[in-house]
């Protein structure tokens, strides 16, 4: 378990923690396996052979299921639950806190094409857009703040 105060747990760790389960190597491996594609128990035993013991695969699949990480389809295939399988971003209203989920292909392609600054490997990303929902925008005292992203970056740094 990392001790860095600034360590950010990902969704798998958050779900496990919520269920009082620890984040282990086997659970991470099973999750990563299912992140690529749904699989049967037998397929997972085979693909993780030599890495995770068969009995550990069975045991941890049950644990992941109870934590809401994975579900079993009627055809026997395990897959990640919507909470983990669906990638999305959010828009947050700075006045009322309303959150709206969104997904945009152009943003995903741009972020996937960006390899990150030197000596860093990008695995995943989170993106939050802040602003005003239409209700708060129409309040008489509301003023729209200017966007700042590109201006600030030009002054400080580029990577
Ligand atoms: Zn609002
Ligand atoms: Zn994204």
Image (cartoon, rainbow, N blue to C red):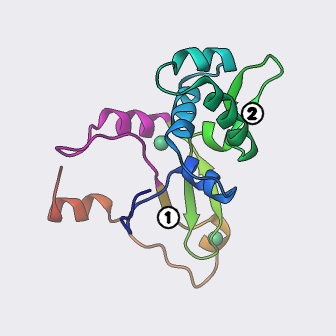
- The residue shown at (58%, 55%) is 14
Residue 11 horizontal/vertical position (percent): 56, 49
Residue 115 quadrant: top left
Q: Residues within 10 Å of mark 1 (few under 14, many from 20)?
A: some
Pair 2/1: label in front: 2
Residue 122 horizontal/vertical position (percent): 33, 41
The secondary structure making up most of the magenta span is loop
Which mark identifies residue 71?
2
Q: Is residue 79 left or right of residue 105?
A: right
Confirm whether residue 50 shows in the render: yes
Residue behind label 2 places its C-beta within 8 angstroms of ligand 2? no
Residue 90 horizontal/vertical position (percent): 56, 54
Residue 62 horizontal/vertical position (percent): 73, 37
Which mark identifies residue 141?
none
Q: Tell me which segment is drawn in magenta.
A: 105-127
- The residue shown at (75%, 44%) is 66
- The residue shown at (69%, 35%) is 59
Q: Is residue 123 magenta?
A: yes
Q: Earlier in the sequence, mark 2 or mark 1?
A: 2
Secondary structure under tag 2 reads strand
């Amino acid at each position: 378990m990392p001790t860095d105060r600034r360590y950010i747990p990902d969704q798998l760790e958050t779900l496990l923690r919520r269920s009082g389960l620890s984040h282990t190597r086997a659970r991470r491996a099973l999750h990563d396996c299912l992140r690529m594609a749904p699989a049967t128990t037998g397929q997972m035993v085979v693909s993780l052979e030599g890495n995770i013991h068969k009995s550990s695969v069975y045991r941890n699949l049950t644990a992941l299921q109870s934590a809401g990480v994975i579900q079993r389809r009627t055809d026997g295939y395990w897959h990640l639950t919507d909470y983990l399988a669906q990638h999305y971003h959010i828009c947050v209203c700075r006045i009322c806190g309303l959150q709206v989920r969104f997904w945009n292909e152009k943003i995903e392609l741009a972020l996937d094409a960006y390899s990150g600054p030197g000596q860093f490997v990008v695995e995943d990303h989170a993106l939050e857009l802040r602003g005003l929902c239409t209700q708060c925008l129409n309040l008489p005292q509301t003023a729209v703040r200017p966007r700042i992203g590109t201006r600030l970056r030009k002054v400080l740094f580029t990577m």
